[in-house]
Amino acid sequence: MVRNRVQRLLTAINRRMMKLLIALALIAYVASVWGNFVNMRSIQETGEQKMEKQLEEFIAPLREKIRDLEKSFTQKYPPVKFLSEKDRKRILITGGAGFVGSHLTDKLMMDGHEVTVVDNFFTGRKRNVEHWIGHENFELINHDVVEPLYIEVDQIYHLASPASPPNYMYNPIKTLKTNTIGTLNMLGLAKRVGARLLLASTSEVYGDPEVHPQNEDYWGHVNPIGPRACYDEGKRVAETMCYAYMKQEGVEVRVARIFNTFGPRMHMNDGRVVSNFVLQALQGESLTVSINCMFK
């Protein structure tokens, strides 16, 4: 009889243990499922956030295009000549938002060509070309010519470079890179697509000339380590690369050595003689000339 009671007791204990083990197993299973659900939910939310970010990055340029189109319906552009497909050129202007580049942009746009302006806005200003934004023949790209550019064009006007002393001496390494690596990239582009390239060079390739006036046979008198050397030597190397590409690769090139320029859109703090004269005259000051001489 005692033995039967013991067996019944053990059986009851075993049943309770089994129930307890089953309950613990169920708790563990539920906890595991809940943990997986939470993790999956977290992953799902992260995935949704990532997808939303990717969609936003994709949609943002489209919104910009729509705004440009809406603006183009109401904006009045300067008169543009109509050219046939045969006569219309696809033209790239580097530094096209700068002083000289923006006027070149105006000329080529009004002549009826398709113009793409590339500028990193280091010295250029968007407002110099904003009157063309939205026009079907115009495109503005924020890009640094130190990085390669892949585009199909017929002509390249390479004007990208800081030209005023305060600007090019502010970051001499950047000035050198723009005039060397930037020019190399544009020559490489011209070679790939068979485009003609014009390099906007400078009278600074003559340095401090010992001959006046300077003709194209004069090689110059340049200090390679002076404060202006980053610009002077950068342009000299750019010219050398142009002629090397012409001789070795058959690239059609032109070089224009531009002297002092002035006109609308020039920076008043440009730092060159014309802007200095104008600024000093407007302020009623004496005009500064070389060798510390002054006149009124």
Image (tube, rainbow, N blue to C red):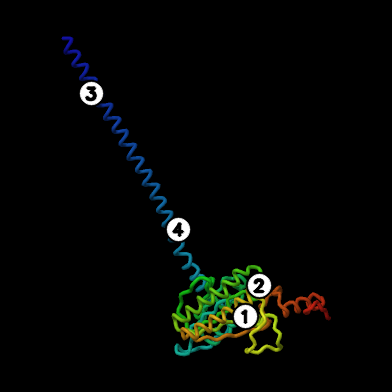
3 and 1 marks in contact (CB < 8 Å): no
The answer for how far apart the CA atoms under marks 3 and 2 are is 95 Å
x, y percent for residue 118: 54, 75
Residue at 46% in and 77% down: 151
Type of the residue with mark 3: Arg
Camera-near label (1 vs 4) is: 1
The answer for how far apart the CA atoms under marks 3 and 1 are is 95 Å
Camera-near label (3 vs 1) is: 1
How many discs mark residues in the rendered view? 4
Type of the residue with mark 4: Lys
Q: Which residue is mark 3?
A: 15
Mark 1 Cα-neighbour bin, 10 Å: few <14, some 14–19, many ≥20:
some
Query: Which of the two discs, 1 and 2, labels the residue nearer the N terminus?
Result: 1
x, y percent for residue 153: 47, 81
Camera-near label (3 vs 2) is: 2
Q: Which residue is mark 4?
A: 53
Looking at the rendered structure, the secondary structure element under dot 2 is: loop
Mark 2 Cα-neighbour bin, 10 Å: few <14, some 14–19, many ≥20:
few
Disc assigned to residue 100: 1
Q: Which residue is mark 2?
A: 225
Which residue ends up furthest to the top in the rendered image? 1
- Tell me: residue 45, above or below residue 210: above
The answer for how far apart the CA atoms under marks 4 and 2 are is 49 Å
Camera-near label (1 vs 2) is: 2
x, y percent for residue 203: 65, 83
